[in-house]
Image (tube, rainbow, N blue to C red):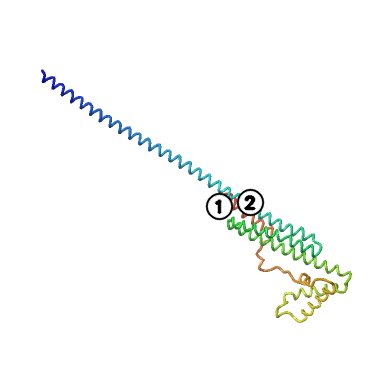
Amino acid sequence: MKDLQGIGAIAAAVVAAVGIASTILIGRWTLRGALRGAEETARAGLAQADASYRAALDAVRAQGQNDHLQWRRSVQRDAYAAFLQSVLNYTDSAHNNLGRASGLEETRACIAALRGLETDMSHRAWVVQLEGPDEVAGAAITLEASAKILVVAEQTHALKMAAMHEVRLRSRTHRQEVVRIWELVPVAQGFWRTIGTPDMEDSSNELLAELRALFSRCELSTGLIATLCQPHDHDPLLADIPSVNEAIKGFIRAAREALHPERVPAL
């Protein structure tokens, strides 16, 4: 009887041991499955978080690039507008003020006042060249050259008109001298380009000497002889430079294409 009880106790212990082992094994499997599921869930969460982060980062970058592009266009637009305004200030001031000048001193004062406007225009043209692009920079160089050529022509014309006015004023007190000056000036214009060259004739030297004497007797600066006699033919080297109005149109067209490339039709 005692043996049977001992065998039962041993069997019960074995069964209990087996149950404990099974429970532990099942628990391990359950834990391992839970850990695997948690790991997969974590991975999915990290992937989603990474995707969200990258999407947000891309959005920030895109917005930053767009903001930078808008800022660059704003800077360029201001530079283009400032340059164009400086050109108009320069050419309009030359046209209006030189046209109203009545004498040599006033004309020279107007020309001196234009130097500041010319410097401002050149400075703003350099800004445009730095900002670019190349098409706009090239159009700015052309427009600046056109404006300078126009103003030089107007200055030359104004100085010649002022010199003629000074000579006319002397007709009241030196009538004969003034009449002779008007006779000699067209002749001097004809040979002026030969001065200082082997082609210059002795008669030309004699005529210039007479002109200097006439100007001295009329109490006029002999420097006005060059103003009156020097021809200002169109320089063939400047033949490719467009007028100011055409250059302005070209600059505006290039500026629009640079600021709004999306509006330019594809070639």
* Quadrant assignment, res 23: top left
Image location of residue 11, percent across then percent down: 16, 23
In this image, 247 relative to 164: left or right?
Answer: left
Q: Quadrant of the N terminus?
A: top left
Q: The residue tagged with tag 1: helix, strand or loop?
A: loop
First of labels 1, 2 by sequence position: 2
Residue topped by disc 2: 78
Using the image as rendered, state which of residue 20 and residue 197 is in the foreground. 20
Q: Is residue 214 above or below residue 122?
A: below
Residue 266 - label: 1
Crowding at label 1, few (<14), some or many (≥20) Cα neighbours within 10 Å? few
Query: Marks 2 and 1: in contact by CB < 8 Å?
Result: no
In the image shown, does 242 or 99 lie closer to the viewer?
Answer: 99
What's the amino acid at mark 2?
A: Asp
Query: Which residue appears at 16% of the width and 22% of the height?
Result: 9
Residue at the spot 82% in from the left edge and 76% down from the top edge: 213
Report x, y in % for residue 25.
25, 30
| Circle 1: residue type | Ala
Answer above or below: position of 158 versus 207.
above
Measure the C-alpha gap from mark 1 to mark 2.
Answer: 26 Å
Q: Residue at x 62, y 53 (%)?
A: 255
State the image coordinates of residue 197 (x, y, percent, origin top left): 70, 78
Q: Residue 168 at what x, y percent from top left?
A: 85, 68
**In front: label 1 or label 2:** 2
